Amino acid sequence: MMGREQQIIKERLRKLGELRANGVEVYPSKSNKKQTCIECLKSKIGFKVIAAGRVITKRDLGKISFANLKDSSGEIQLVLQDKETPSATKNFFKKYVDSGDFVEVEGKIFKTKTKQISILVKKVKILSKSILPLPEKFHGIKNDEERYRKRYLDILMDNKVRDIFLKKAKFWRAVRDFMEKKEFIEVETPAIEVTTGGAEARPFKTHHNDYDVDVYMRISVGELWQKRLMAAGFEKTFEIGKVFRNEGSSAEHLQEFTNMEFYWAYADYKDGMKLVKELYRKIAKEVLGTTKFKSRGFNVDLAKDWKEIDYQKEILKQTGIDVLKASEKEMKRKLEELKVKHDGKGKERMIDNLWKYCRKNIAGPAFLVNLPKIISPLAKEMPNKKGFVQRFQPIIAGAEVGNGYSELNDPIDQKKRFKEQQKLLETGDEEAMMPDWEFVEMLGHGMPPTCGFGFGERFFSFLMDKPIRECQMFPLMKPEGKKK
């Protein structure tokens, strides 16, 4: 710790001890706060207020002292002035209050000579004495590692960071309002599962001591559970919840994130595309106030027509590879030529890596359609296009920001595809889907035609044009000092 910082801490501890010795409660349990900072700014001149918040900056000019008080609504200036502020209050503030302290102030609204709306302080009460100094007001925390670890200071000192999370609250509120207005019922499904279904990803594994069985954190928002609800007679369900995937981190991927999934009986993927287009436009308007935004170097307008991009044709156009006809050797050679990293395990992964190369060149908004059956183990096959499925993915700024399809409800076909996924798992493909044989049994009882769709924080990060890690309040951090 720096020498100057040690001096500041020592001085603040001295003040703390002195206050307590004088009988002052420096960590009281309650405040008499009546107005927010914004309400104070909107009040009439002369109106008496009781405000509370954190002192961000403090300046003492002798006969007059200034400070900035900040709460969740915003900031207002405090003024303590000779002949206007009681000398005992002014002296107490000058002697004991530091930037970072939470205080309650009583006073009246007035305008300074520079016409700035402020609180002319009459009384001051310390609500929480800060021991550690705040980062510098105009520099904040620059190191990303420290910003994420001390996110509370990052949000406090940078209103742009704070604004991200206010918009994120609007994002999920818009989703919930939209789904409820469309008469979808919000449900809750298990986060701990015996088998992880609904996505292709490596799960987190743990042990259930009471049952003495290995279990997994879910990798989808209850896909196979919500489909069971379709069989149970529900026709429209959705869930917003946490998902856990034990995979690598990137600007678009995290191990823990929030997603939403809906399931809609008697609808197909075409119906889903119409609903999703409407939903995404609604979200953008609620969060940004417009359907237009810039992300990852692309200019995007969700109000425009959404093109349909054929999976096989797009890869052929960009790489010259027909994913259904090319051999693994040909695809591997092309990936190496394009300098695309890949693990070289199986045709399914080769195809997926080729697509990931191609998608980066698509601005959107668009829907990716006609995906191969080999990479879609839960989607219904196209009736007149063997080897392809009724699946769609919204493409925005070079990435998929959602995934949906006409759900496979043929138990015989589903059993066959799960067996194929089981073979992939046995050959070392950790992202292959874990079979759920009880789900197959449910399909045997019958499930109506259903459209399912899921999306989440990745779409929000694209609206913000930020890495997804930047859009999480408290991203997972390794313990300080721990090496890779």
Image (cartoon, rainbow, N blue to C red):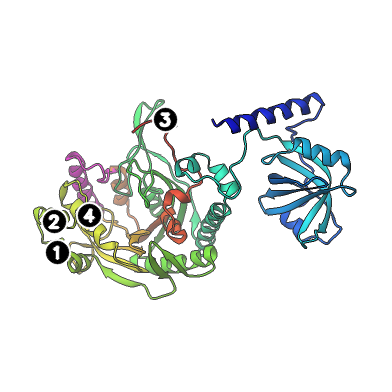
> Dot 2, crowdedness within 10 Å: few (<14), some or many (≥20)?
many
Amino acid carrying mark 1 in the image:
Asp
Can you give x and y, in whole percent of width and height, for residue 449 in the image? 34, 61
Cβ–Cβ under 8 Å for marks 4 and 2: no
Ranked by sequence position, the earlier of labels 1 and 4 is 1
Amino acid carrying mark 3 in the image:
Gly
> Dot 1, crowdedness within 10 Å: few (<14), some or many (≥20)?
some
Tag 4 secondary structure = helix
Label drawn at residue 398 = none
Amino acid carrying mark 2 in the image:
Met
Amino acid carrying mark 4 in the image:
Asn
Pointer 2 residue: 331
Pointer 3 residue: 481
Real-space Cα distance between discs 4 and 2?
Answer: 9 Å
Which quadrant, please, contains the C terminus?
Answer: top left
Ranked by sequence position, the earlier of labels 4 and 3 is 4
Cβ–Cβ under 8 Å for marks 4 and 3: no
Pointer 4 residue: 353
Taking the image as shown, residue 407 lies to the left or right of residue 331, namely right
Cβ–Cβ under 8 Å for marks 1 and 2: no
